[in-house]
Image (spheres, helix red, strand yellow):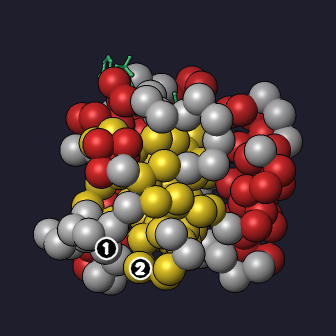
Amino acid sequence: MLIRVEIPVDAAGIDALLRKAFGRDDEADLVQQLREDGLLTLGIVATDDEGGVVGYAAFSPVDVAGVDRQWVGLAPLAVDASLRRQGLGEKLVYEGLDALNEFSYAAVVVLGDPAYYGRFGFKTAAQYHLHCRWPGAEAAFQVYPLAESALNEVSGLVEYSAPFNRF
Ligand SMILES: CC(C)(COP(=O)(O)OP(=O)(O)OC[C@H]1O[C@@H](n2cnc3c(N)ncnc32)[C@H](O)[C@@H]1OP(=O)(O)O)[C@@H](O)C(=O)NCCC(=O)NCCS
């Protein structure tokens, strides 16, 4: 198993993995649109011995209260069903956080299960007066500061890019 940054030749494998892992087209279509619009800040793939894509994490830009603060959103995250619960998801997330930290991004947000993302250090965004536009998402919307000062004097609506409007 190899965990690495996405390259153009991975696109078809990522597409197939996302359609299978989520059992619908929305996430695969989202990633295609992000890629087309130049909004894929970072993609991390897990590949098997044949080079097939078996895991994927995407990061794309978000605004905070209308301002670009070098924050990104993690979405989607997926691992092939036959390879789950072996720590692959964890490796994809850590690899992504490491690379983003290296590139000096300031923070990462995610909408997901706090029991899962809490282990990486994601915190409920609401405690920093940050929210997203999806109703009822307060407990699931989380933030991970990469820069020490990222959460200082920042609050308000965290807005994902236009391709997320499908959700
Ligand atoms: C969410 C998802 C990406 C997690 O991938 P994964 O590779 O299974 O993730 P991990 O192995 O890092 O951790 C998953 C769970 O397995 C557990 N686990 C990790 N290694 C394990 C091991 N060796 N043995 C047993 N359990 C293990 C973790 O503790 C975690 O448990 P919990 O979530 O029940 O508390 C995967 O389930 C998936 O693709 N789901 C469908 C798409 C989806 O819903 N994505 C999330 C959108 S926010």
Q: CA distance from mark 2 to mark 1?
A: 7 Å
Ligand 1 occupies quarter: top left
- Dot 1 alpha-carbon crowd within 10 angstroms: few under 14, some 14 to 19, many 20 or more: some
Q: Which badge, 2 or 1, is on the more N-terminal residue? A: 2
Q: Is residue 157 visible?
A: yes
Residue at the image point whose x is 59% and y is 62% from the top: 159
**Are the residues at dot 2 and dot 1 in contact (C-beta closer than 8 Å)?**
yes
List the residue tagged with mark 1.
106
Left or right: where 167 falls relative to 14:
right
Residue at the image point whose x is 33% and y is 83% from the top: 103
List the residue tagged with mark 2.
69
Between marks 2 and 1 in the image, the one whose residue lies nearer the viewer: 2
Q: Report the label total.
A: 2
Helix, strand, or loop for circle 1?
loop
In the rendered image of this protein, does residue 146 appear above or below residue 54?
below
Left or right: where 133 falls relative to 93:
right
User: Residue 24, percent across and down?
Assistant: 83, 34
Residue at the image point whose x is 26% and y is 69% from the top: 153
Of 47 and 68, nearer the camera is 68
Helix, strand, or loop for circle 2?
strand
Q: Is mark 2 within 8 Å of ligand 1?
A: no
In the rendered image of this protein, does residue 81 appear above or below residue 44?
above
Residue that lies at the very extreme toward the left in this rendered image: 148
User: Residue 59, percent across and down?
Assistant: 52, 63
- Of the 4 image quadrants, the one containing the C terminus is top right
User: Residue 112, percent across and down?
Assistant: 49, 35
Q: Is residue 2 visible?
A: no
Amino acid marked by disc 1: Ala
Residue 125, disc? none
- Dot 2 alpha-carbon crowd within 10 angstroms: few under 14, some 14 to 19, many 20 or more: some
